[in-house]
Amino acid sequence: MAEVWEASKMIELTIDGKKVTAKEGDTILKVARENNIYIPALCYLEGVSSFGGCRVCLVEIKGSPRVFASCVTPVAEGMEIITNSERLKRYRKWAVELLLSERPHVCSVCVANGSCELQQLATDLGVDHLRVEREWTNYELDLTHERFAYDPNRCILCTRCIRICDEIEGVHTIDLMLRGKNSKVIFDLNDKWGFAESCTSCGKCSAVCPVGALYVKGKPHSESKRKELASFVTSRRSEKTIG
Amino acid sequence: MPDAGAQQAGLKADRRLMLLEAAIRKYQYRKDALLEVLHTAQELYGYLDRDLLIHISKLLRLPPSHVYGVATFYNLFKLKKPGTHVVTVCMGTACYVKGAEDLVLAVEREFNVKRGGTTADGKLSLFVTRCIGACAMAPNAIVDGETIGKATPEVVLKKIRAIMEAEKD
Amino acid sequence: MKPDELRSLAQKEAEARKSYRYRINVCCSSGCMPFGALKVLSAFKDAVKEFGVEGECYVARTGCIGTCSIAPAVLIEPGDYLYQNVTPDRAKEIVKEHIVNGRPVKSMLYGNEAYFKKQLRIVLRNAGKIDPLRIEDYIAVGGYYALLKALTRMTPEGVIEEVALSGLKGRGGAGFLTGLKWRYVARATGSPKYVIANLDEGDPGVFANRTLAEADPHAIIEGMAIAAYAVGASKGYIYVRSEYPLAVETLKKAIEAARSMGLLGEKIFETAFSFDIELRLGAGAFVAGEETAILASIEGRRAMPRPRPPYPAQSGLWGKPTLINNVETLANIPVILLKGSEWFASIGAKNCTGTKCFSLTGKVNNPGLIEVPMGITLREVVFEIGGGVPPGRRFKAVQVGGPSGGFLPEQLLDLPIDYESLTKAGAIMGSGGIVVLDDTSCMVDTAKFFTEFCVDESCGKCVPCRVGLYKLYKILDGFTRGEGSLEDLQKVEELCEFIKEASLCGLGQTAPNPTLTTLRYFRDEYVAHILEKKCSAGKCFKNGGGVGGE
Ligand SMILES: Cc1cc2nc3c(=O)[nH]c(=O)nc-3n(C[C@H](O)[C@H](O)[C@H](O)COP(=O)(O)O)c2cc1C
Ligand code: SF4
Ligand code: SF4
Ligand code: SF4
Ligand code: FES
Ligand code: FES
Ligand code: FES
């Protein structure tokens, strides 16, 4: 535990031209948020490991032709970070459009309408039509759990639920099955949620789901979201990544 | 001595189970040996059914969803029982360029089976794979473990018919 | 094993080899096996007895020679006489004529002279010339001497320096400087350290690593042991594709043999260096060859890449410093140590030294595995060694670098093969796949084929690759069925840019290459598909009206 008490080295860098100081080793996203600079993020969840999958948190770093996912890229001394170029907007728009087209995200009939992070981001980015065709996936809605519901047709595979169930609740009821475009969030051995023996019904997963895929039955979506998060995160884990 | 959990999981206490558990012991119940264990289990049982996955997850003390996630990530692992006979057609680049698609179509048509599937009577499975490393002999098909290089639809069909016939006698 | 024991064993074996006037190498690797290689092997054994030349003629069971298209292949030394399509009857005749009467049977020889002239075999130095299952064979040709030299006469830093000076770059795809990578791992703190030999070889249409493992497994093992000594690792893993059963079997036996001779294990050559190797089998996932995914796979998890940093050199297997090298990279190492970095650096091109193995396949007269100096032109490979496209057909394109590579047209055939030139042209070195396409291949269809491969193999972690590639596939598929408009081409380019730039790992970052290069060099085919519903190769529009059909 000794390292925890060691004073971390502080470094200086700029984000969108603004000078900021940061702890060495922290991610760009974290430092930006601490300084009230907004970078969108969908798969990122404070308090659990980073995933780096959604790619809406991309930023540019001066001197490199590449773009970087800010939720997994550590800051470095003298870095000049750009969070909002035209190019980044273009990429973020693609990411959001692709997510909206991957499964039938028809917001008007979704429980999360109005409190969905994907919907909000689409509005922010001015996504008003999709350049690619929608998929009309037809996964079965799982209503077997007495308190929660799972609609795979809304899932954006951000894995927040998986990480919080594993790292905070400590049971690892949830994981992904198959791969690529066939990936799907499952409980235990691809069981119906109500029959997943390992689930403690803690509700953390549904609280952090950014969209309307996991939700509390019979409760307005906005009320069951994230508010409780602070109390979950009793121990901040180091920001390692899972694969 | 088979593990007590085995019967619970609905597995017969037979030789296969002994060998599987011996393999798991050899890996000292290490969680990171999951892929090795799944390989062994599939070799012994032919495919990975639910009971087997439950048993493995218990012995390795891994969450069931993790085991299921791994078993379905990798193409090689089969969760459904394959047919008595298995035809695998290579659809890697070299084979594709040399007409592997025609081999697949021929088998699909003649035996009324879809790629990745098994005939209704459970006699024949048709799988496609991506390169078996014999590209210079493209296109390649494997019928019950035997590789046919420079394959043509006629040769492949003939071979399959032959093994299906042999079965009948 | 003591140093002296290696020397005396090598001497004894070399003398035994010399006592035979001829050596008949019968390939029994996975290309020749299905064509009766084992029967040919026993026919040769019988024939030498029958003609009473057992004493001067050694019949060896060897690994792949590289000319799998003429299976079963047999190589007779001295003189490197390569016989094609050998049958048991022919074996008998070859013994009678070649050995007894001293007259090679010209009509049965592989007549492709460029095949020998243009090649330079460093990695494949022993392929087809030793019995992979006899460690003594490897020792007889100087095997494990480089390890002995490293352990007894060089410091770890000295080994790294030698590798760095050779200019060797990783042969697994990215072309990273091997010496530099070793230095990172050597300097990283943490213990134990690990070495991983990457033999996932997921590129469909590539079989160089398979050949190497089946023909000369000890070259990989020795290379790994030297690497481990240099970076301070004590444990190694070879990650092999499970689609290569013979390679798996061969490596397993080779590791056991090395262990039983004390070339793996505790205190190798009576030094303080201990090192052992474990095999790990893949299970059908192309992405598992990516360097962070391979870590996940060896740890028993889903092979999903993770962001870097941290690099495996700092935090690899179980969070420990880990060196990951391709097996071809590793097989170069013993030769570099024995012949010196200067010698190695003099081969190939500037900034790109040494040789590279290529799997030459597709519509080419002489498909097979070749090893050529870097800097050779594509034209030499395709038309001289490969003998061009089959009679009556027209060359159209060559696809270099597998599913993440690109298609290059006729006018780029004089491009020298090196990392930079290929990347500039939109292809990549990749793991060395060269697929030749003639006028029967449609570029739109082939781009779609590669995109579909990447869709199937995407791990699904990041959005550009998981969703973007699938959408790209759908659009390309539309083109082959008469859907889509010219505006869609613009959209395809934008989508490709996003996938390339925003994907997490190399799979997504390179997957648009086939589409982008076909758009760059064969745009008229796309236009013909869209505007005229015409496919000059007759591949497309089969299920939906349109022209075409064969
Ligand atoms: C999707 C993907 C698949 C890969 N597959 C392989 C492979 O099969 N074999 C290999 O050696 N390298 C493969 N690589 C490259 C490795 O990540 C890594 O760069 C290489 O093994 C390093 O070895 P080297 O420096 O000796 O080339 C792959 C990379 C990606 C992105
Ligand atoms: S309710 Fe709690 S235990 Fe159950 S799946 Fe969700 S996070 Fe895991
Ligand atoms: S269910 Fe919700 S939290 Fe879980 S992966 Fe899907 S979108 Fe993310
Ligand atoms: S680029 Fe593709 S394979 Fe790589 S991490 Fe993203 S989804 Fe997975
Ligand atoms: S928030 Fe960074 S990739 Fe999703
Ligand atoms: S592509 Fe079929 S064997 Fe390689
Ligand atoms: S397998 Fe025999 S030459 Fe390649």
Image (spheres, coloured by chain):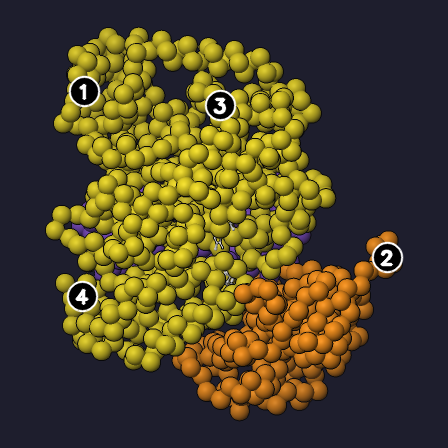
Chain colours: A orange, B purple, C yellow
What residue sits right under mark 4 in the picture? C536
- Any mark on residue C104, and which? 1
Quarter of the image for the C terminus of chain B: give it.
top left
Secondary structure, mark 3, is loop
Out of B120 and C462, give the one closest to the viewer. C462
Precedes in sequence: disc 1 or disc 4: 1
Rendered position, C298 above or below C309: above
Q: CA distance from mark 4 to mark 3?
A: 53 Å
Give x and y (percent) for residue C217.
46, 31
Residue C71 visible in this rendered orientation of the protein: yes
Q: How many callouts does the rendering have?
A: 4
Do the numbered discs 3 and 2 sit on residues whose CB atoms are within 8 Å? no
- Return the residue at label 2: A6
Query: Are discs 1 and 3 less than 8 Å apart at CB?
Result: no
Q: Hey, what amino acid is under mark 4?
A: Ser
Residue placed at 28% from the left, 31% from the top?
C116
